[in-house]
Image (tube, helix red, strand yellow):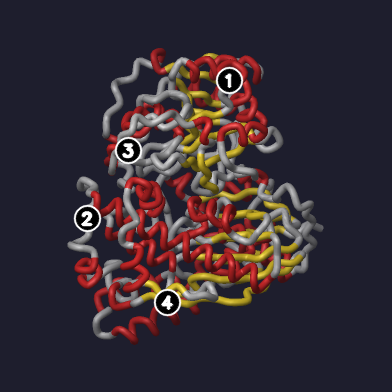
Amino acid sequence: MSTKILGISAYYHDSAACLVVDGEIIAAAQEERFTRRKHDSRFPKHAIESCLREGGLAGSRDLDFVVFYDKPILKFERLIETYLRYAPGGLPSFLQAMPLWLRQKLSIRELIRKELDYRGTILFTEHHESHAASAFFPSPFERAAILTVDGVGEWATAGLGLGEGNRIRILKEIHFPHSLGLLYSAFTYFTGFKVNSGEYKLMGLSPYGRPIYVDLIERELIDLREDGSFKLNLKYFNYCAGLTMTNRRFARLFGGPPRRPESPLTQREMDLAASIQVVTEKAMLGMARAAHAQTGCENLVMAGGVALNCVANGRILREGPFKNLWIQPAAGDAGAALGAALFVHHQIQCGARRVDGRRDLQKASLLGPSFDDAAIASFLRERGVKAAHCGDLETLVEKVSDLMAEGHVIGWFQGRMEFGPRALGCRSIIGDARNREMHTTMNLKIKFRESFRPFAPSVIKERTADYFDLATESPYMLLVAQVRRDRLLPTNGDNPTGLDKLKAGRSVIPAVTHVDNSARIQTVSREDNPRYHRLIERFAEKTGCPVIVNTSFNVRGEPIVCTPDDAYRCFTRTNMDYLVLGSWLVDRKDQNLPPPGTSWMKEFALD
């Protein structure tokens, strides 16, 4: 008889659910995709329903275990100890936090029973155990060092561990308030972006700046040690007990108050982004080297929010001591739901684990709901949407590859929704990477987001080395590598600074080449996503270029689309030219749509 385990993360940010049956990941999804509320932290009711439906379960009573991804009592203990240490200074923060804890977070076992109508066994894993399990158990390795780095769990902010067979062990931890994730979030806040949301913007902004503050950061804010550990100078931060990340000392150190959100970016913000990115990479490399020294493994696996820093990941792969690297694609708290379920199966139930050293067990992270052509046709009829049915796959990719080559922007909706923050070719907006106008068009007319933000290339796996200095697969868009020198364009001798760097063409694939000639790469394999692979392959047969632009199917502040209805609504709000829903092709010109406006901004808070 099979063992069915539901993993849950909730009540902090990025609530999610995952269903594991006999060690196999059946389904996983974030709550935000269903509620259309980005980073939704509420109980993942809709995500749970989706997972149970995908697994063919009638309801929660078919489950053997439900597991929560951290231990609220330990987190509450840390909260109380921190407030007492900083009293009376932290009183406003304490008064704001306590009602939610007393009403909700200390009663999670009872909340789970009530929400699910569940009377079975409920278990709790520690936060960094969940991250570590999510990193190791789906990986392709029999044995690997484990590195988990985030803001904070219960007490741990980083963990070094070892995974062997169906067991993981945490060997070393760094504890709150010393946190690399919170340090990076402090700079996210100070440069005017939203904490727990805008960190990737800070990373994308860093190549526009100069790392002139590195020495100051290392002298005043963080002590990086030879053993890979670190300590923060807490006199510059306010997150322990205050309502902001940084304080006046921090502002004096960097020449003035934090940037106001949505105000113009200055050279200071760009230089701060470049500097903290360098320091973060240095810290991550130090931890990776420490993990190698302690475990002697040739493989490294990573999770936690900081593991989404794909620039640092690229450096660990290139400069670190490990032969192989695998990163959980849902590295943040959403993925901890998956890790918690796998932890129970392998670590508590002693369930077997079979790996081949090559393919991971994450199923390309295509773990969400899907909609077949019949369901899509029904939706199109109900909404009165004019669409052409393209029949078989070859007819579809023939038409869509032509449209891309003509410069059109296309919403691409296929198969199961991705689990994690990246669109991987099932809920994507795509276009021609060779088109010099594509970057600006997508940022300003499709995504309605900041002009400095880069787009990722999707490249068919077998042609990766033709365009990028990357000797491994990157299926989850979690590695940054340089565009090959022979694909770069000659410069005219100018040396632009700041956002003026955007004006340069840089390479033969300018839409996906960042201003430092790097790219956040997704390698696409025929095994993982045959439809998407065939589309890019056909585009390459026509144009000679096996690379296209891939960005998530959403507007700024909106979660990635989940359903055909979500996709069509997003399509109508933007300047996308075509929408592909399964085998159906929707032409904007046929829809009698008004010009896209900004009314969606009332629905989605800016990220």
Q: How crowded is mark 4: few (under 14 residues within 10 Å), some or many (20 or more)?
A: some
Give the mark toward the camera: 1 or 2.
1
Q: What residue type is labelled 1?
A: Gly
Give the mark toward the camera: 3 or 4.
3
Q: Nearer the viewer, residue 101 or 199?
A: 199
Is residue 103 visible in the rendered image? The answer is: yes
Q: What residue type is labelled 2?
A: Arg
**Looking at the image, do the residues carrying marks 3 and 2 touch, with CB atoms under 8 Å apart?**
no
Query: Where is residue 61 shown, x and y percent of the image?
Result: 66, 59
CA distance for labels 3 and 1 = 27 Å
For label 3, the SS is helix
Q: Which of 43 and 510 is in front in this view?
A: 510
Query: Where is residue 222 shown, x and y percent of the image?
Result: 38, 72
What is the total number of numbered labels drawn onto the structure image? 4
Q: What residue type is labelled 3?
A: Lys
The residue sitting at 74% across, 63% down in the picture is 143
Is residue 521 positioned above or below 342 on the image? Answer: above
Residue with the mark numbered 4: 231
For label 2, the SS is loop
Query: Where is residue 606 shown, x and y percent of the image?
Result: 30, 46
CA distance for labels 3 and 4 = 35 Å
Q: What residue type is labelled 4?
A: Lys
